[in-house]
Amino acid sequence: MASATDSRYGQKESSDQNFDYMFKILIIGNSSVGKTSFLFRYADDSFTPAFVSTVGIDFKIKTYSWDNAQVLLVGNKCDMEDERVVSSERGRQLADHLGFEFFEASAKDNINVKQTFERLVDVICEKMSESLDTADPAVTGAKQGPQLTDQQAPPHQDCAC
Ligand code: GDP
Ligand code: MG
């Protein structure tokens, strides 16, 4: 599990400090599925084939409400078609069952990495907009919902595998 606020990942010197919103994103999955690689591909557009296990960060969260968490299901390493263990169909079925959108991606070949993060941000913004629309403006002081992107993110690529 990695957080985008982890200093190793999120604090590039060149990073743009001029932003309107900051979201915490958790990448959750079994060891060596490619969580670190996925994040590095997105943040630095880099990939290393070497496996360097992420040193765990111990912290406890009493409540992290799934009601407010926006979740996407990602199957990484779609470039390794010959060694596939989960079919696209099974992945899609699981995502449907859980009510999540499903992406197949490759941190190595840079397939659907940016699209996944951008879609997640869009989903978060849509939910924020909905909650602001239904909230009492007298309480929130909100005048209008967030408008984070001028353009819709392009539809995600189909995995070529
Ligand atoms: P984590 O434990 O989930 O953080 O996994 P890592 O990001 O450390 O990746 C584990 C191993 O899988 C490393 O050797 C990576 O180079 C490799 N890996 C990660 N993503 C991909 C991918 O999309 N395709 C391929 N072929 N290998 C990958
Ligand atoms: Mg890792």
Image: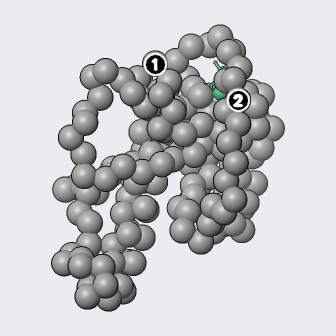
Picture layout, residue 156 above or below residue 111: below
Q: Residues within 10 Å of mark 2 (few under 14, many from 20)?
A: few
Residue drawn at x 36%, y 23% is 12
Picture layout, residue 13 above or below residue 148: above
Q: Left or right of 12: which side holds 147?
A: left
Quadrant of the drawing holding the C terminus: top right
Q: Circle 2 sits on which residue?
A: 56
Q: Circle 1 sits on which residue?
A: 46
Picture quadrant where residue 33 is located: top right
Q: Left or right of 150: which side holds 79?
A: right
State which image quarter holds ligand 2: top right
Residue drawn at x 47%, y 28% is 7
Residue 79: % across, % down: 62, 28
Residue 133 seen:
no
What's the residue type where badge 1 is placed? Ser
Residue 99: % across, % down: 63, 68
